[in-house]
Amino acid sequence: MPLNISIILSSMRHKSQGVRPAKFIFNKCKERGFNVTLIDPKEYNLPILDAMYKEYAKGTAPELLEKLHKIFSETDGFILLTGEYNHSLPPALTNLMDYFREEYFFKHAAIASYSGGPIAGMRSAVQARVFCGELGMTTQRTMFGIPNVHSAFDPEGNPADESFHPKIKRFLDELEWHANALKEARAKGLPF
Ligand SMILES: Cc1cc2nc3c(=O)[nH]c(=O)nc-3n(C[C@H](O)[C@H](O)[C@H](O)COP(=O)(O)O)c2cc1C
């Protein structure tokens, strides 16, 4: 069975720069044979959290939450593709993910980040590791940072700089290893 990978974007902006690198990562995941789903907060447009998914009585959660619950429950590995807002995680990313909890437990998360300048969103990427840790996920050392995002990819997701190819390979190599290891371990049972 192929790994199920979910790529979660971070921005509600109609001009979001995350869409082009998302295409690049999505295509690279496909090349590896992953079953990959792109989650764009703009397409879900979830309100600021009132009740988590699990707080709804069975069968009464809004349709979009049911859809995300199913996707996240079946996901083996998450890729957070985060921008950086005021040295922090964009609220669209945390708000969307905050609706769920157990869906993430004992799974792996890999962090990709970008920003308009040379820092590549690294300050939010570091926070994303802490955030994913609290959600019960393992995170990996290899990140995928994209500086100067405005000019880094064309609209089809092709990189302007060839060095993105070996960088994404290492990033996805590590993701694949962890996601497979945890998938195997989850099949044997969970500690709680
Ligand atoms: C509210 C806001 C805060 C930002 N703060 C930072 C920042 O702290 N560091 C940084 O490098 N870029 C910052 N930027 C610039 C973003 O890196 C750049 O606009 C990026 O494209 C935002 O992601 P998005 O296009 O997916 O919304 C900020 C942009 C916005 C809209």
Image (tube, grey):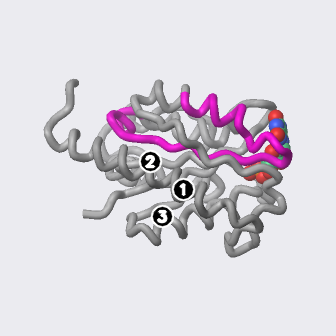
Which of the two marks, 3 or 1, is nearer to us in this view? 3
Give the label on residue 52, or none: none
The spot of residue 135 in percent (x, y) is: 44, 30
Which of the two marks, 3 or 2, is nearer to us in this view? 2
Q: Amino acid at mark 3?
A: Cys
Q: Callout 3: few (<14), some (14-19), or many (20+) C-alpha neighbours within 10 Å? A: many
Q: Residue at x 47, y 61 (%)?
A: 37
Say whether mark 3 is within 8 Å of ligand 1: no
Magenta region, residue range: 101-129
- Residue extending furthest bottom? 156
Question: The residue tagged with tag 1: helix, strand or loop?
Answer: strand
Q: Is residue 166 above or below residue 142?
A: below
Give the label on residue 29, or none: 3
Residue that mark 1 sits on:
39
The spot of residue 46 in percent (x, y) is: 59, 46
Cα distance between the residues tagged 3 and 1: 14 Å
| Displayed quadrant of residue 120 | top right
The foreground one among 52 and 59 is 52
- Labels 3 and 2: the sequence-earlier one: 3
Q: Amino acid at mark 2?
A: Glu
Q: Residue at x 36, y 57 (%)?
A: 4
Q: Amino acid at mark 1?
A: Ile
Give the label on residue 174, or none: 2
